[in-house]
Image: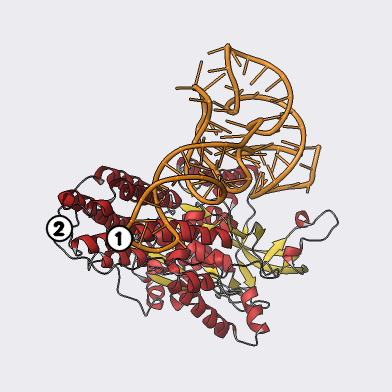
Amino acid sequence: MTKAFYITTAIDYVNGQPHLGHGYEKVIADVIARARRSLGEKVFFLTGVDEHGQKVQQAAVNEGKSPQAYCDELAAAFKDFASKLGLSNDDFIRTTDRRHEAVVQALLAKLHASGHCYKATYKGFYSPKEETFLTERDRRPDGTFDPSYGEVIELEEDNYYFRLKQHQRWLIEHIEANPDFIAPPYRRNEVLGLLNNNVLEDLCITRPAARLTWGIPTPFDPSFVTYVWFDALINYVTVPASFGDSAILSLLNESDKSSLAPRPSPLPFGLWPADIHVIGKDIIKFHAVFWPIMLKTMELPLPKQILVHGFWQKDGQKLSKSTGNIVDPIAVIDEWGLDAFRYYVVRELDIGPDGNWTDAGFRARYQAELANGLGNLVNRSLSMLKRYRNGLVPARSDELASEAEKVIRETVANLRSNQLQAALQSVWSLVARANQYVDHTAPFKLAKDPAQAKRLDEVLYNLAETCRILAVLLWPFLPATAGKIYSQLGLSETPDKLADAAWGRLSADRTIGEPAALFPRRD
RNA sequence: GGCAAGGUAGCUCAGCGGUUAGAGCGGGCGCUUCAUAAGCGCUAGGCCACAGGUUCGAAUCCUGUCCUUGCUACCA
């Protein structure tokens, strides 16, 4: 069975409304997914929400709702958000899905049966807020715990632990042997540093049902529920299983499989292992340490890459609901349009470093790059074609062909290596070149001299064809805008195949559509 | 404290041993009128954090200092 390019985002924890950070991660994953499809690959793009755990249970109680009702509302909000972002996701996982519960329980039972976990008593400090155990080492010099842990309580309880120590060596070797496993490289170094300088503590993978009911019951001991992170990571294989991926299904017995129902029709290709897990820098340890070990013990192949992005600030300050330093992506999209939002976050910030959102910066990129750069180029090119040639595309001319082809090559190479910011820079070098070309050839002067008719034809073809190629190159980033350029060119298809970014595909003697501003100026 | 990355034009950054240190944005000055008062061209602006050293030659390599950021730890 052939395998699709399988890309995932982190699943968002439903303890609040979607914000900029969520939106950013989903957009970069979507751009990569669309780029791969445009390159002709089969792609499966997964996103979703993480719903179990103490904080969700508490938030539901605070709002006087059942956890399920609370989650249903927020899951709907996140689904709406995904569509607001124009995501091309193929599925949307909820960790309260029946299929997910079935897979988590099956895998947990398998781990338990094969001796990878054990029961032990823990006595010590616990932070309900972070759902994590604390030790004396977590104390600050004055004896208190960091405020980020909230109220810290002392408790003594039994739990099940997942053995990690014996996995440290092969994991280091795997990371060293696979330089792209964790990207960018400095994140990889951090993980190696962590693994080389510390002995991994076994991971507590349950919580007593006595104090937390909002979780997946542990199959081998009903007095516990599954730790939320252990549950959450498994989403990446739940969905392949539910679509009939043989790699995962082989781990399940017949009754597990029947619990996957109602099952969508199986896909004609495999999904696991994932090609890319897109995540934020805060959850790198879960994805680069715990998750590979979980997979190894389940005898499943490891994902190809964990792609770690940075965080946004606003005006140089940390985003924070309590101080009101926030960016509301939905408001931005409503005011400026979806493609403007997608453009800004990808163009402003490379995948890896932290970035800084400023409203002035957003406005500047919108005006200079989208309205005056790309938008005006398409508008002036098509307006002249309409005015001087009645909208009829002249015969092919290759004056800009080699420059366009160079940009196409660069853009494709950047897309293949997930260098999205660099890809946009390449594309805009063609925008700039075409604007310069208008200036140098001055078609508006040629139009005044009938003897220059042939030259004018050449110039107009070069401009129209450049606009068409720009549409194809931009499709992964700005799908709506790319579609508009195509329809203004009078092309009825969708510019979603990079193979069409080949010079000369625009055929002569067809009539273009009506030019209209792609990004209206806003003053 | 340890490890790592970095400190280059007003801003964001590239350059990482070899001609007068670059780009984009922003500033200033011109040109143009097809276009969303858009576009194009020219230009100003930098003890390349600081101090030593290696070298014929150093933003570029080495050492130290100061500062920023990330990870990690507080222990001999």
Q: Find numbered disc 2 in the image and state the secondary structure of the residue it sits on.
A: loop
Q: Is residue A301 left or right of residue A161?
A: left
Residue at the image position 22 percent from the left and 65 percent from the top: A512
Report x, y in % for residue A254: 37, 73
Q: Mark 1–mark 2 contact, CB under 8 Å?
A: no
Report whether residue A113 is seen. Answer: no
Furthest residue toward bottom: A64
User: Which mark is drawn over residue A492?
Assistant: none
The residue that label 2 is drawn on is A508
- Toward the viewer: A385 or A401? A385
Residue at the image position 53 percent from the left and 56 percent from the top: A287
Tell me the quarter of the image containing the N terminus of chain A. Answer: bottom left
Q: Residues within 10 Å of mark 1 (few under 14, many from 20)?
A: some
| Residue type at the position of mark 1 | Lys
- Toward the viewer: A467 or A9? A467
Furthest residue toward right: A142
Report whether residue A137 is seen. Answer: yes
Q: Are marks 1 and 2 on the same chain?
A: yes
Q: Is residue A196 above or below residue A113?
A: above
The residue that label 1 is drawn on is A42
Chain name for mark 2: A
- Toward the viewer: A446 or A48? A446
**Marks 1 and 2, how far apart at CA:** 32 Å
Report x, y in % for residue A22: 53, 66
The answer to which of marks 1 and 2 sits earlier in the sequence is 1
Residue at the image position 30 percent from the left and 74 percent from the top: A265
Q: Quadrant of residue A86?
A: bottom left
Report x, y in % for residue A192: 57, 44
